[in-house]
Image: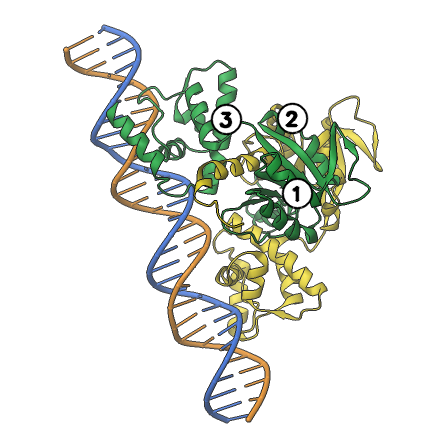
Chain colours: A green, B yellow, C orange, D blue
Amino acid sequence: MDLALTRLLSHLSSPSRRISDSAIRRLSRYVRELEAMEAAGEGTVPSRVLAARAGTTAAQVRKDFSSFGSFGKRGMGYAVSPLRERLSTILGVDRRWPVLLVGAGRVGSALFEYPRFRSRGFDFVAVLDHSPEKVGREWKGMRIEHVRDVARIVPERGIRIAILAVPGPEAQKVAEDLVSAGVRGILNFAPTKLRMPPGVAVNDVDLVMELEALSFLLSSGGKMAEGPE
Amino acid sequence: MDLALTRLLSHLSSPSRRISDSAIRRLSRYVRELEAMEAAGEGTVPSRVLAARAGTTAAQVRKDFSSFGSFGKRGMGYAVSPLRERLSTILGVDRRWPVLLVGAGRVGSALFEYPRFRSRGFDFVAVLDHSPEKVGREWKGMRIEHVRDVARIVPERGIRIAILAVPGPEAQKVAEDLVSAGVRGILNFAPTKLRMPPGVAVNDVDLVMELEALSFLLSSGGKMAEGPE
DNA sequence: AGGCACTTGTGACGATTTTCACAAACCCCC
DNA sequence: GGGGGTTTGTGAAAATCGTCACAAGTGCCT
């Protein structure tokens, strides 16, 4: 008990080493699988099983958890619900996040209607554009506002995360305005590498790049694996 | 000259070591930046400049290229157009790819209309669904076909890459059918880890996971960088 | 209570990826 | 033609990431 407390404190006080990007994504996947297990009424799960479901190895699962403390019971595995809660807290998804959407074009529109965002805790609280045709339009119960009001809207609604779905050439400028307004995390759909000050997190989603990666693998490595029919 | 030839051959014959996933994505970004430079009429570019535009380091750029041969001239940098051509060939994007879209729901619909796919060499040549309401419907000049015909359609149209935009629970089954039909690369939008035989490349795109990664960074690391206004 | 079967947590190891540093190559100008 | 300023290509070092192996716990059964 004393030992556990000490360990917990040491983990809380020192974010020992930075958690890798891939580790974060694995945590996200663990949470998803744990929720499914919870719904299925499973009480405990060993790292081996969780690993299989998340597409990784048992050692990797345990290593990932060990960065944050020790949640399991030896011989028994992990209690599903407490582990899910714990990981949710670590990921910061044990709450709802107000999210800003910038760009009401094709991509923005699709993202706005994507139901999994809301169901996973991310709520659009504003949609911004700069086109006079779009600003003011009602959009599924939300009025599109002008991007020039970003400096008012972001603090007003406690926004820290924004989704950027504007054309490539505009992305850098808009992103800078977002950061000035207080945004600290950007999910960027523009095929542009954003130059951001430290303290701002950017995740790029470039669908063409993903297809090109497949193209490469099929073009170069394709020869060796003409395999399983 | 002799040396260069020898080196070229050695690179062609032996895919020496496997190219990392992140390296592939960087190549993709290099090509995009090189195209912009080409359009701007720039003749040559040093690794330092290309690195700045692609958001990496000069050493990284040179290292990435060195896996495939040597394209630059010492003291001068790289000739933009030849380099772009060379990298395009390596990535396999110096041609057009017929692509299969599976799932004509919200996500599939958005992807189908996403214009950058076509403009970057990826052509949808079939759209599949299993809903009786959707199959047979005309969709921007393309008829939605039944997913059960996948075994005929894939070889018939020379498809090797598919985009999977079906609900999570169906993804594994559909993916297996795709692979049986001959698909070797899958861009997967379902929040499911696909279990695939070797020789099949899968790239996952999970937008919620991307937001959760931002959530984590803002929740944990956010304290230290309350910085630049 | 004690042995057994099982699983965690973690230090050590191995592999991979990135950064560093510098010799070799190249152009330009005088 | 030779010197100077620049940049590539690449071994070697550093850092990061994943795997292994095993001591230490834990529940269960007898």
Left or right: where A2 falls relative to B220: left
- Res. B156 in view: no
Within 10 Å of disc 1 (Cα), the crowding (few <14, some 14-19, many 20+) is: many
Q: Nearer the viewer, mark 2 or mark 3?
A: 3
Q: Which residue is mark 2?
A: B167
Secondary structure beneath label 1: helix
Asked whether the residues under marks 1 and 3 belong to the same chain, the reply is yes
Check the residue under mark 2 and report the chain it is in.
B
Q: Which residue is mark 1?
A: A150
Q: What residue is drawn where x is 28% and y is 26%? A: A4
Secondary structure beneath label 2: loop
Residue type marked 2 = Pro
Left or right: where D2 falls relative to B44: left
Mark carried by residue A94: 3
Quarter of the image for residue A86 reads top left
Residue type marked 3 = Asp
Q: Which of the image's four quarters has the N terminus of chain B? A: bottom right
Q: Nearer the viewer, mark 2 or mark 1?
A: 1
Q: Whole-percent x and y of residue A216?
A: 60, 50
Q: Are marks 1 and 3 in contact (CB under 8 Å)?
A: no
Q: Whole-percent x and y of residue B26?
A: 56, 53
Secondary structure beneath label 3: loop
- Res. A136 in view: yes
Check the residue under mark 3 and report the chain it is in.
A
Q: Whole-percent x and y of residue C17?
A: 46, 51
Quarter of the image for residue C28 reads bottom right
Left or right: where A4 falls relative to A164: left
From the viewer's side, name the closer residue of B11 and A125. A125
Q: Nearer the viewer, mark 1 or mark 3?
A: 1
Check the residue under mark 1 and report the chain it is in.
A
